[in-house]
Amino acid sequence: MTVTRSIVLFVAAALLEIGGAWLIWQGVREHRGWAWIGAGVVALGLYGFVATLQPDAHFGRILAAYGGVFVVGSLAWGMVADDFKPDRWDVTGALVCLLGVALIMYGPRPDAT
């Protein structure tokens, strides 16, 4: 249950952070205006909150692992929102990142006493 919760939180964090950055990008680079920028700022703030809900208590571990989730999520977002077509190196790199996430977050550790 803890691993499932952690994965759901990582996905939610990725949607909020990547979505927030994309909204700001659209507001500034695509001249969509302040409403888009404001929505992006709110989404980025919510990302920061969601990251605190991870079951693990170590900030550095959470953010390090999230970096791999961010890489994979960014590629997926580009595919959906911007018609980005990843090549084999993008996919290979994303899989390496996910392996890193699994090792950092879910690797066996001795019980801390």
Image (cartoon, rainbow, N blue to C red):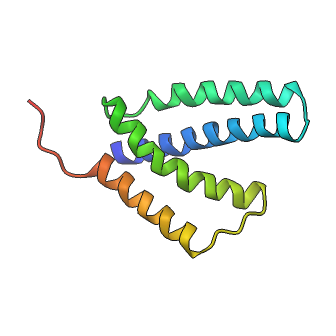
Q: Is residue 103 left or right of residue 78?
A: left
Where residue 60 sits in the image (x, y, percent)?
35, 33
Q: Residue at x 73, y 41 (%)?
A: 22
Residue at the bottom extreme, as displayed: 88
Q: Residue at x 54, y 47 (%)?
A: 70
Note whether residue 38 is visible: yes
User: Which quadrant of the structure image shows residue 44?
Assistant: top right
User: Which quadrant of the structure image shows residue 102?
Assistant: bottom left
Q: Tell me: residue 102, above or below residue 25.
A: below
Residue 94 or residue 7, whichever sits in front? 94
User: Which quadrant of the structure image shows residue 99?
Assistant: bottom left
Q: Tell me: residue 87, above or below residue 31.
A: below
Residue 55 or residue 44, whichever sits in front? 44
Q: Residue at x 73, y 58 (%)?
A: 80
Q: Is residue 13 left or right of residue 36?
A: left
Q: Is residue 95 left or right of residue 22?
A: left
Where residue 65 sits in the image (x, y, percent)?
40, 45
Q: Residue at x 57, y 43 (%)?
A: 14
Report the label total. Answer: 0
Where residue 113 sits in the image (x, y, percent)?
8, 29
Residue at the left extreme, as displayed: 113
